[in-house]
Amino acid sequence: MYIVPESAIADILTRPDAFNAVEQVFAAMSAGVAYNFPVIREAIGHEEALYGFKGGFDGKGMSLGLKAGGYWPHNLEKRGIINHQSTVFLFDPDTGKVAAMVGGNLLTALRTAAASSVSIKHLARKDSKVMGMIGAGHQAKFQLRHALETHSFEKVIGWNYHPEMLPSLAEVAAEFDLPFEAVTLEGMTEADVVISMTSSFNPIFGAAHISDGTHIACMGTDTIGKQECETDLIVKATVFTDEVAQSVTLGETQHAVSAGLKSRDDIFELGAVINGTHAGRTSDREITLFDGTGVGLQDLAVAASIVEIAKAKGIGMDVDF
Ligand code: NAD
Protein backbone atom coordinates (compact mmCIF):
# COMPACT_ATOMS: atom_id res chain seq x y z
CA MET A 1 0.00 0.00 0.00
CA TYR A 2 1.33 3.41 -0.96
CA ILE A 3 0.88 6.12 1.70
CA VAL A 4 0.88 9.83 0.89
CA PRO A 5 0.44 11.84 4.10
CA GLU A 6 -1.52 15.07 4.29
CA SER A 7 1.70 17.01 4.89
CA ALA A 8 3.04 16.00 1.45
CA ILE A 9 -0.01 16.88 -0.66
CA ALA A 10 0.82 20.58 -1.11
CA ASP A 11 4.18 19.66 -2.70
CA ILE A 12 2.59 17.13 -5.05
CA LEU A 13 -0.77 18.28 -6.32
CA THR A 14 -0.87 21.25 -8.69
CA ARG A 15 -4.07 23.04 -9.65
CA PRO A 16 -3.80 21.88 -13.31
CA ASP A 17 -3.44 18.26 -12.13
CA ALA A 18 -6.60 18.58 -10.03
CA PHE A 19 -8.43 20.29 -12.91
CA ASN A 20 -7.52 17.57 -15.41
CA ALA A 21 -8.45 14.74 -13.03
CA VAL A 22 -11.86 16.27 -12.29
CA GLU A 23 -12.60 17.12 -15.94
CA GLN A 24 -11.76 13.56 -16.99
CA VAL A 25 -13.83 11.90 -14.28
CA PHE A 26 -16.89 14.10 -15.02
CA ALA A 27 -16.57 12.98 -18.64
CA ALA A 28 -16.26 9.32 -17.59
CA MET A 29 -19.35 9.60 -15.36
CA SER A 30 -21.38 11.02 -18.20
CA ALA A 31 -20.15 8.34 -20.59
CA GLY A 32 -21.47 5.74 -18.13
CA VAL A 33 -18.09 4.17 -17.37
CA ALA A 34 -17.76 5.63 -13.87
CA TYR A 35 -20.32 5.72 -11.10
CA ASN A 36 -20.62 6.89 -7.51
CA PHE A 37 -21.83 4.69 -4.68
CA PRO A 38 -24.61 5.90 -2.38
CA VAL A 39 -23.27 8.43 0.12
CA ILE A 40 -23.25 7.61 3.83
CA ARG A 41 -23.28 10.55 6.23
CA GLU A 42 -23.95 10.06 9.93
CA ALA A 43 -24.17 12.28 13.00
CA ILE A 44 -22.18 9.96 15.28
CA GLY A 45 -23.35 11.51 18.56
CA HIS A 46 -19.80 12.34 19.65
CA GLU A 47 -18.10 15.75 19.36
CA GLU A 48 -21.12 16.81 17.24
CA ALA A 49 -19.25 15.20 14.35
CA LEU A 50 -20.67 14.33 10.94
CA TYR A 51 -18.84 11.31 9.54
CA GLY A 52 -19.34 9.43 6.30
CA PHE A 53 -18.12 7.77 3.14
CA LYS A 54 -18.16 8.80 -0.50
CA GLY A 55 -16.98 6.17 -2.94
CA GLY A 56 -17.18 4.92 -6.48
CA PHE A 57 -15.57 3.10 -9.37
CA ASP A 58 -14.14 4.68 -12.49
CA GLY A 59 -13.81 1.95 -15.11
CA LYS A 60 -11.88 4.26 -17.45
CA GLY A 61 -9.38 5.79 -15.01
CA MET A 62 -9.51 2.46 -13.11
CA SER A 63 -9.88 3.98 -9.66
CA LEU A 64 -11.87 2.19 -7.01
CA GLY A 65 -12.23 3.33 -3.43
CA LEU A 66 -13.69 5.77 -0.98
CA LYS A 67 -13.12 8.93 0.98
CA ALA A 68 -13.83 8.57 4.68
CA GLY A 69 -14.21 11.60 6.84
CA GLY A 70 -16.40 14.52 7.71
CA TYR A 71 -16.76 17.56 9.90
CA TRP A 72 -15.71 17.95 13.54
CA PRO A 73 -16.94 21.43 14.52
CA HIS A 74 -14.75 21.78 17.64
CA ASN A 75 -11.39 20.70 16.20
CA LEU A 76 -10.01 24.19 15.64
CA GLU A 77 -10.97 25.68 18.99
CA LYS A 78 -10.12 22.56 21.07
CA ARG A 79 -7.16 21.06 19.22
CA GLY A 80 -5.89 23.60 16.71
CA ILE A 81 -6.57 21.34 13.72
CA ILE A 82 -9.02 22.01 10.89
CA ASN A 83 -12.65 20.98 11.27
CA HIS A 84 -12.90 19.09 7.96
CA GLN A 85 -10.94 15.81 8.22
CA SER A 86 -10.77 13.11 5.57
CA THR A 87 -8.64 10.32 4.10
CA VAL A 88 -8.91 8.61 0.70
CA PHE A 89 -8.39 4.85 0.28
CA LEU A 90 -7.77 3.41 -3.18
CA PHE A 91 -8.10 -0.28 -4.02
CA ASP A 92 -6.78 -2.36 -6.91
CA PRO A 93 -9.88 -2.92 -9.10
CA ASP A 94 -8.44 -6.23 -10.36
CA THR A 95 -7.90 -7.81 -6.94
CA GLY A 96 -9.64 -5.70 -4.28
CA LYS A 97 -6.32 -5.30 -2.47
CA VAL A 98 -5.82 -1.92 -0.83
CA ALA A 99 -3.50 0.16 -3.03
CA ALA A 100 -3.11 3.56 -1.40
CA MET A 101 -3.98 5.80 1.52
CA VAL A 102 -3.92 9.52 0.75
CA GLY A 103 -4.48 12.58 2.98
CA GLY A 104 -7.82 14.04 1.94
CA ASN A 105 -8.02 17.54 3.39
CA LEU A 106 -6.17 19.73 0.87
CA LEU A 107 -7.24 17.25 -1.82
CA THR A 108 -10.90 18.05 -1.04
CA ALA A 109 -10.31 21.79 -1.24
CA LEU A 110 -8.52 21.47 -4.59
CA ARG A 111 -10.96 19.02 -6.18
CA THR A 112 -13.88 21.27 -5.17
CA ALA A 113 -12.17 24.32 -6.64
CA ALA A 114 -11.37 22.35 -9.78
CA ALA A 115 -15.07 21.48 -10.25
CA SER A 116 -16.25 25.09 -10.45
CA SER A 117 -13.32 25.89 -12.75
CA VAL A 118 -14.20 23.04 -15.08
CA SER A 119 -17.73 24.49 -15.22
CA ILE A 120 -16.33 27.95 -16.03
CA LYS A 121 -14.20 26.54 -18.84
CA HIS A 122 -17.16 24.75 -20.44
CA LEU A 123 -20.11 27.04 -19.66
CA ALA A 124 -19.02 30.66 -19.14
CA ARG A 125 -19.01 33.18 -21.97
CA LYS A 126 -15.53 33.46 -23.44
CA ASP A 127 -15.69 37.29 -23.09
CA SER A 128 -16.39 37.12 -19.32
CA LYS A 129 -14.52 39.93 -17.52
CA VAL A 130 -15.92 40.27 -14.00
CA MET A 131 -15.62 37.43 -11.48
CA GLY A 132 -18.13 37.58 -8.61
CA MET A 133 -17.78 35.73 -5.29
CA ILE A 134 -20.57 35.06 -2.79
CA GLY A 135 -18.86 33.68 0.31
CA ALA A 136 -15.42 34.34 1.73
CA GLY A 137 -14.66 31.39 3.99
CA HIS A 138 -11.94 28.74 3.86
CA GLN A 139 -13.10 27.14 0.61
CA ALA A 140 -14.01 30.37 -1.23
CA LYS A 141 -10.34 31.34 -1.57
CA PHE A 142 -9.55 28.04 -3.29
CA GLN A 143 -12.49 28.50 -5.66
CA LEU A 144 -11.42 32.03 -6.56
CA ARG A 145 -7.74 31.15 -7.10
CA HIS A 146 -8.68 28.27 -9.39
CA ALA A 147 -11.18 30.42 -11.35
CA LEU A 148 -8.65 33.21 -11.88
CA GLU A 149 -6.19 30.65 -13.23
CA THR A 150 -8.78 29.11 -15.58
CA HIS A 151 -10.02 32.28 -17.27
CA SER A 152 -8.57 35.73 -17.80
CA PHE A 153 -10.75 38.10 -15.72
CA GLU A 154 -10.23 41.86 -15.31
CA LYS A 155 -11.85 42.42 -11.93
CA VAL A 156 -13.13 40.55 -8.86
CA ILE A 157 -16.19 41.59 -6.89
CA GLY A 158 -17.41 39.96 -3.69
CA TRP A 159 -20.19 39.79 -1.13
CA ASN A 160 -20.21 37.89 2.14
CA TYR A 161 -22.69 37.45 4.98
CA HIS A 162 -19.77 38.30 7.30
CA PRO A 163 -18.22 41.29 5.48
CA GLU A 164 -15.15 41.30 7.74
CA MET A 165 -14.00 38.15 5.89
CA LEU A 166 -13.87 39.85 2.47
CA PRO A 167 -10.20 40.95 2.69
CA SER A 168 -9.22 37.29 2.17
CA LEU A 169 -10.77 37.48 -1.32
CA ALA A 170 -9.00 40.78 -2.00
CA GLU A 171 -5.71 39.03 -1.15
CA VAL A 172 -6.36 36.31 -3.73
CA ALA A 173 -7.31 38.91 -6.37
CA ALA A 174 -4.05 40.76 -5.60
CA GLU A 175 -2.07 37.55 -6.28
CA PHE A 176 -3.33 37.92 -9.87
CA ASP A 177 -2.85 41.73 -9.95
CA LEU A 178 -6.59 42.19 -10.18
CA PRO A 179 -8.67 44.88 -8.45
CA PHE A 180 -11.20 43.76 -5.84
CA GLU A 181 -14.43 45.52 -4.93
CA ALA A 182 -16.86 44.64 -2.12
CA VAL A 183 -20.40 44.93 -3.46
CA THR A 184 -23.99 44.61 -2.30
CA LEU A 185 -25.94 41.61 -3.59
CA GLU A 186 -27.59 43.98 -6.08
CA GLY A 187 -24.08 44.86 -7.30
CA MET A 188 -23.52 41.20 -8.23
CA THR A 189 -25.35 41.93 -11.53
CA GLU A 190 -22.00 43.28 -12.78
CA ALA A 191 -20.49 39.78 -12.69
CA ASP A 192 -20.12 37.59 -15.78
CA VAL A 193 -19.26 34.57 -13.63
CA VAL A 194 -20.40 34.01 -10.03
CA ILE A 195 -19.24 31.35 -7.58
CA SER A 196 -21.27 30.89 -4.41
CA MET A 197 -19.48 29.07 -1.61
CA THR A 198 -21.30 29.43 1.69
CA SER A 199 -22.73 27.20 4.40
CA SER A 200 -26.14 28.87 4.17
CA PHE A 201 -29.41 27.07 4.91
CA ASN A 202 -31.47 29.94 3.44
CA PRO A 203 -31.41 31.43 -0.05
CA ILE A 204 -29.03 34.40 -0.33
CA PHE A 205 -29.43 35.49 -3.94
CA GLY A 206 -31.84 34.93 -6.81
CA ALA A 207 -32.69 35.87 -10.37
CA ALA A 208 -32.78 39.58 -9.43
CA HIS A 209 -29.05 39.49 -8.59
CA ILE A 210 -27.82 37.72 -11.72
CA SER A 211 -27.61 39.29 -15.19
CA ASP A 212 -28.49 37.52 -18.41
CA GLY A 213 -25.51 35.68 -19.87
CA THR A 214 -23.93 34.93 -16.50
CA HIS A 215 -22.50 31.58 -15.49
CA ILE A 216 -23.01 30.67 -11.82
CA ALA A 217 -21.31 27.85 -9.95
CA CYS A 218 -23.26 27.05 -6.77
CA MET A 219 -20.77 25.11 -4.67
CA GLY A 220 -21.83 25.43 -1.02
CA THR A 221 -24.90 23.18 -0.94
CA ASP A 222 -23.83 19.60 -0.30
CA THR A 223 -26.36 18.51 2.33
CA ILE A 224 -30.13 18.11 2.64
CA GLY A 225 -31.62 21.42 3.80
CA LYS A 226 -28.83 23.73 2.63
CA GLN A 227 -29.68 26.40 0.04
CA GLU A 228 -27.80 29.31 -1.51
CA CYS A 229 -30.01 30.55 -4.34
CA GLU A 230 -33.72 31.25 -4.72
CA THR A 231 -35.65 28.69 -6.74
CA ASP A 232 -36.53 31.42 -9.29
CA LEU A 233 -32.93 31.33 -10.48
CA ILE A 234 -32.92 27.53 -10.74
CA VAL A 235 -36.06 27.80 -12.89
CA LYS A 236 -34.64 30.58 -15.08
CA ALA A 237 -31.18 29.05 -15.63
CA THR A 238 -30.04 26.10 -17.72
CA VAL A 239 -28.84 23.84 -14.92
CA PHE A 240 -25.86 21.48 -15.04
CA THR A 241 -24.42 19.37 -12.26
CA ASP A 242 -21.76 16.81 -11.44
CA GLU A 243 -24.36 14.09 -10.73
CA VAL A 244 -28.12 14.52 -11.16
CA ALA A 245 -29.04 12.07 -8.37
CA GLN A 246 -27.00 14.06 -5.85
CA SER A 247 -28.12 17.43 -7.16
CA VAL A 248 -31.83 16.71 -6.66
CA THR A 249 -31.40 15.13 -3.23
CA LEU A 250 -28.70 17.13 -1.45
CA GLY A 251 -27.57 19.77 -3.94
CA GLU A 252 -28.80 23.22 -4.89
CA THR A 253 -31.68 21.95 -7.03
CA GLN A 254 -33.26 19.91 -4.18
CA HIS A 255 -35.71 22.70 -3.24
CA ALA A 256 -36.88 23.56 -6.78
CA VAL A 257 -37.30 19.87 -7.65
CA SER A 258 -39.20 18.98 -4.48
CA ALA A 259 -41.47 22.00 -5.05
CA GLY A 260 -42.19 20.74 -8.59
CA LEU A 261 -40.64 23.86 -10.17
CA LYS A 262 -37.88 21.98 -12.01
CA SER A 263 -37.86 18.49 -13.43
CA ARG A 264 -34.81 16.31 -12.90
CA ASP A 265 -34.96 15.67 -16.68
CA ASP A 266 -34.08 19.35 -17.15
CA ILE A 267 -30.84 19.04 -15.16
CA PHE A 268 -27.84 18.05 -17.24
CA GLU A 269 -24.44 16.58 -16.44
CA LEU A 270 -21.44 18.81 -16.97
CA GLY A 271 -19.70 15.68 -18.24
CA ALA A 272 -22.10 15.62 -21.20
CA VAL A 273 -20.89 19.08 -22.20
CA ILE A 274 -17.26 17.95 -21.82
CA ASN A 275 -18.01 14.89 -23.99
CA GLY A 276 -19.87 16.96 -26.57
CA THR A 277 -23.17 15.12 -26.11
CA HIS A 278 -24.83 18.29 -24.73
CA ALA A 279 -24.35 21.64 -26.44
CA GLY A 280 -23.86 23.50 -23.13
CA ARG A 281 -24.39 27.26 -23.44
CA THR A 282 -26.28 28.10 -26.64
CA SER A 283 -26.52 31.90 -26.44
CA ASP A 284 -24.77 34.89 -24.89
CA ARG A 285 -27.93 35.79 -22.97
CA GLU A 286 -28.50 32.35 -21.45
CA ILE A 287 -27.88 31.96 -17.71
CA THR A 288 -26.01 28.72 -17.01
CA LEU A 289 -25.82 27.31 -13.47
CA PHE A 290 -23.54 24.53 -12.27
CA ASP A 291 -24.67 22.76 -9.11
CA GLY A 292 -21.42 21.34 -7.74
CA THR A 293 -22.43 18.84 -5.07
CA GLY A 294 -19.08 17.09 -4.69
CA VAL A 295 -18.90 13.41 -5.68
CA GLY A 296 -16.67 10.62 -4.43
CA LEU A 297 -15.22 10.01 -7.89
CA GLN A 298 -13.69 13.49 -7.83
CA ASP A 299 -11.76 12.49 -4.70
CA LEU A 300 -10.66 9.17 -6.16
CA ALA A 301 -9.53 10.75 -9.44
CA VAL A 302 -7.45 13.39 -7.70
CA ALA A 303 -6.06 10.86 -5.19
CA ALA A 304 -5.00 8.56 -8.05
CA SER A 305 -3.23 11.50 -9.68
CA ILE A 306 -1.47 12.30 -6.38
CA VAL A 307 -0.27 8.72 -5.99
CA GLU A 308 1.09 8.67 -9.53
CA ILE A 309 3.01 11.93 -9.05
CA ALA A 310 4.17 10.94 -5.53
CA LYS A 311 5.62 7.68 -6.84
CA ALA A 312 7.38 9.47 -9.70
CA LYS A 313 8.86 12.04 -7.30
CA GLY A 314 9.74 9.49 -4.62
CA ILE A 315 7.46 11.15 -2.06
CA GLY A 316 5.46 9.03 0.38
CA MET A 317 6.10 5.44 1.40
CA ASP A 318 5.32 1.91 0.27
CA VAL A 319 4.11 -0.38 3.05
CA ASP A 320 3.79 -4.14 2.72
CA PHE A 321 0.19 -4.52 3.89
P1 NAD B 1 -16.38 28.24 6.16
O1 NAD B 1 -17.01 27.97 7.50
O2 NAD B 1 -14.93 28.55 6.11
O3 NAD B 1 -17.14 29.45 5.43
C1 NAD B 1 -18.54 29.56 5.48
C2 NAD B 1 -19.00 30.67 4.55
O4 NAD B 1 -20.43 30.76 4.63
C3 NAD B 1 -18.47 32.05 4.93
O5 NAD B 1 -18.35 32.84 3.79
C4 NAD B 1 -19.59 32.58 5.84
O6 NAD B 1 -19.60 34.00 5.94
C5 NAD B 1 -20.79 32.07 5.08
N1 NAD B 1 -21.99 31.96 5.91
C6 NAD B 1 -22.08 31.44 7.16
N2 NAD B 1 -23.36 31.53 7.60
C7 NAD B 1 -24.07 32.12 6.59
C8 NAD B 1 -25.44 32.46 6.44
N3 NAD B 1 -26.33 32.24 7.40
N4 NAD B 1 -25.82 33.03 5.28
C9 NAD B 1 -24.93 33.27 4.29
N5 NAD B 1 -23.62 32.96 4.38
C10 NAD B 1 -23.21 32.38 5.52
O7 NAD B 1 -16.74 26.98 5.29
P2 NAD B 1 -16.04 26.49 3.93
O8 NAD B 1 -15.00 25.48 4.25
O9 NAD B 1 -15.68 27.67 3.13
O10 NAD B 1 -17.24 25.68 3.25
C11 NAD B 1 -18.39 26.37 2.79
C12 NAD B 1 -19.46 25.36 2.43
O11 NAD B 1 -19.05 24.58 1.33
C13 NAD B 1 -19.79 24.36 3.54
O12 NAD B 1 -21.19 24.31 3.65
C14 NAD B 1 -19.26 23.05 3.03
O13 NAD B 1 -20.01 21.95 3.49
C15 NAD B 1 -19.39 23.23 1.54
N6 NAD B 1 -18.48 22.40 0.73
C16 NAD B 1 -18.96 21.91 -0.44
C17 NAD B 1 -18.14 21.12 -1.25
C18 NAD B 1 -18.64 20.59 -2.57
O14 NAD B 1 -17.98 19.74 -3.16
N7 NAD B 1 -19.73 21.09 -3.06
C19 NAD B 1 -16.82 20.85 -0.84
C20 NAD B 1 -16.34 21.40 0.33
C21 NAD B 1 -17.18 22.19 1.11
Image (tube, grey):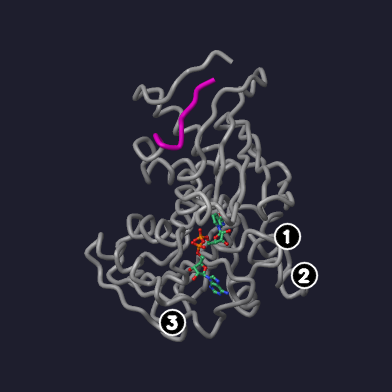
Kindly indicate the quadrant of the structure image that contains residue 132.
Answer: bottom left
Image x and y of residue 197, in percent: 50, 65
Tag 2 and tag 1, C-beta contact below 8 Å: no
* Nearest-to-viewer mark from 3 and 1: 1
The reply to whether the residue tagged 1 has its Cβ within 8 angstroms of ligand 1 is no
Q: Is residue 127 left or right of residue 85?
A: left
Mark 3 near mark 2, Cβ–Cβ under 8 Å? Answer: no
- Earlier along the polypeptide chain: callout 3 or callout 2? 3
- Residues drawn in magenta: 1-8
Q: Tell me, yes or no, whether the highlighted magenta stretch contains residue 5.
A: yes
Looking at numbered disc 1 in the image, what kind of residue is underneath it?
Answer: Thr
Q: How far separated are the C-alphas under marks 3 and 2? A: 28 Å
Position of 242 relative to 185 (above/below): above
User: For mark 2, does the 10 Å Cα neighbourhood hold few (<14), some (14 to 19), or many (20 or more) residues?
Assistant: few
Seen as rendered, the residue at the extreme front is: 78
x, y percent for residue 286: 51, 73
**Which mark is drawn over residue 189?**
3
Name the residue tied to disc 2.
258
Report x, y in % for residue 133: 42, 70
